[in-house]
Image (tube, rainbow, N blue to C red):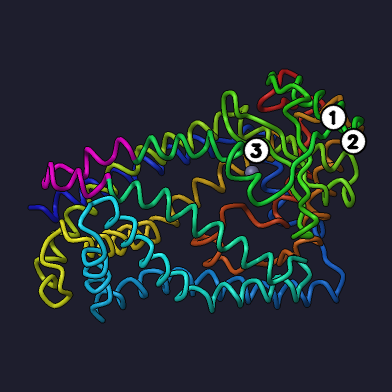
Amino acid sequence: MRLCSTLLLLATLAAGFTIAASRFARDTPTEAWAERQAEHNSTAYILPPAKLQQAVALSRVRRTLDLADALWTPAQLLLLLALGAAERMGRIAVGLAKGRWAQAFSFVFVLLLATHLLNLPLDVYAHRSALRYGLSVQGWGSWLGDIAKTFTLEWLIGGLLVLLLFWIIRKSPTRWWFWFWIPAALTVIAGVFVTPYAIDPMFNKFEPLAKADPALVQRLEQIVARGGLSIPPQRMFLMQASAKSTELNAYVTGFGASKRVVVWDTTIVRCTPDQIGFIFAHEMGHYALGHVVLGIALTCIALLPLLWLGYHAVRALLRRYGAAWGIPSQQDWGALVVMLLVLTTLTTLSDPIANAFSRAIEHNADVYGEEALHGIVADPQAAAREAFQTLGEDSLDDPSPHPLFECWFDTHPPLRWRAAFAEAYNPWAAGQHPKYFAH
Ligand SMILES: [Zn+2]
């Protein structure tokens, strides 16, 4: 019976996401025509032979890392349980202090230490590859510094959440999945709001964009105005990305009072103003089309069934393996490892649905980005296609990704397809109409 209701819930969720995705995938005739053209166009994004060779090799590295990460994350949690390490961590926390606060923070500290150490080989391999292929210029010292900062943030925020979770589990052993959902969803919302203020400046330097490039501010203001958004120049920033990375970006982040524009300094050096305009207009599209609010809402909504499934799976796992793992009850600190195991497995399994949705949204932002440039740059189609070419060359993007990996891991459609679509999409031709703008 429980299996039936679980399957029913999963099917409803999958159907909900599919209906939402198809709503976002609804095309105008102009758009549908350009999509068909894009299928047969393989020259809109091409790499010179030497870069192509690097891109294919790098793609193999990226796919290996994607796959390794998807498998290793649940595997390491399972290992911690099976080897009795999770139970020992709980005992260490209880042995160190009597108070719940100190126990929660000690337990999270030891668990984070173990998982960061277990992830270190993959992290080192990823950074070494980024250095080797010229995507990163960050020295190992600074890289380790960033890991230390991430660790501290995860410890402080994670410690508080775990303390709260176990307090709720003690108060409401059978309904905690619901009561904990409220602070979990609030944390997601607060995270998006606070990140541009408090977290981002810990990792990168920001300065007013008007100081570095007043002409670009003017151009971005024109695009913002055409999109009907209101972001004053004081909230446009230049990020010193070149201290660490060679990759390109220009985007909108935060929401409400924390909403701001960020342009990476690498972008100003290597992209033309028209290309920056497109990259920015695409990102602005995520705001203008409500993707940011929708993304936050969907994450918060999806958390509820995820926690509900987590609650049932944790109970079932503890009944079956609790004795062997030394974790008899969901109130033991070690039960957190079981919960993380269940939640990471569920999110990995739901990735193809979430990513299909993401690709539909990204395509809409491409359409929006191109349309937002009309009347501001001379040739929006060329600006978009060339932006994809520059982005692809810069990040060594494989022109022919494997469809299976694309379906499971990729949040964006393939770059070659996006470039070909941009080239073909012309809603200003006679008899055609833009999707998101009146003209
Ligand atoms: Zn996007």
Percent of width and height locating residue 43: 82, 60
Q: Main secondary structure of the magenta part?
A: helix
Q: In which quarter of the image is residue 138?
A: bottom right
Do callouts 1 and 2 mark residues in contact (Cβ within 8 Å)?
Answer: yes
**Eyeballing the image, is 106 above or below 356?**
below
**Eyeballing the image, is 123 above or below 379?**
below
Q: Residue furthest bottom?
A: 83
Residue under the image location 63 percent in, 76 percent down: 60
- Mark 2 highlights which residue? 213
Asked if one can make out residue 19 in the rendered structure from this viewpoint, the answer is: no
Label annotation for residue 4: none
Point out the tag, 3 or 2, that comes first from the N-terminus: 2
Asked if one can make out residue 81 in the rendered structure from this viewpoint, the answer is: yes
Percent of width and height locating residue 326: 15, 73
**Is the shortest distance between ligand 1 and the CB of mark 2 under 8 Å?**
no
Q: Distance between the residues labelled 3 and 2?
A: 25 Å
Residue under the image location 22 percent in, 50 percent down: 166
* First to last magenta residue range: 164-183
**Is the shortest distance between ligand 1 and the CB of mark 3 under 8 Å?**
yes
Kind of residue sitting beneath label 2: Asp
Percent of width and height locating residue 133: 76, 73
Kind of residue sitting beneath label 3: Ala
- Mark 3 highlights which residue? 365
Point out the tag, 1 or 3, that comes first from the N-terminus: 1
Percent of width and height locating residue 373: 81, 30
Do callouts 1 and 3 mark residues in contact (Cβ within 8 Å)?
Answer: no
109 horizontally vs 359: left or right: left
Q: Does the magenta stretch include residue 30?
A: no
- Mark 1 highlights which residue? 217
Q: Distance between the residues labelled 1 and 2?
A: 7 Å
Residue under the image location 38 percent in, 52 percent down: 158
| Residues packed near mark 3 inside 10 Å, few (<14), some (14 to 19) or many (20 plus) | many
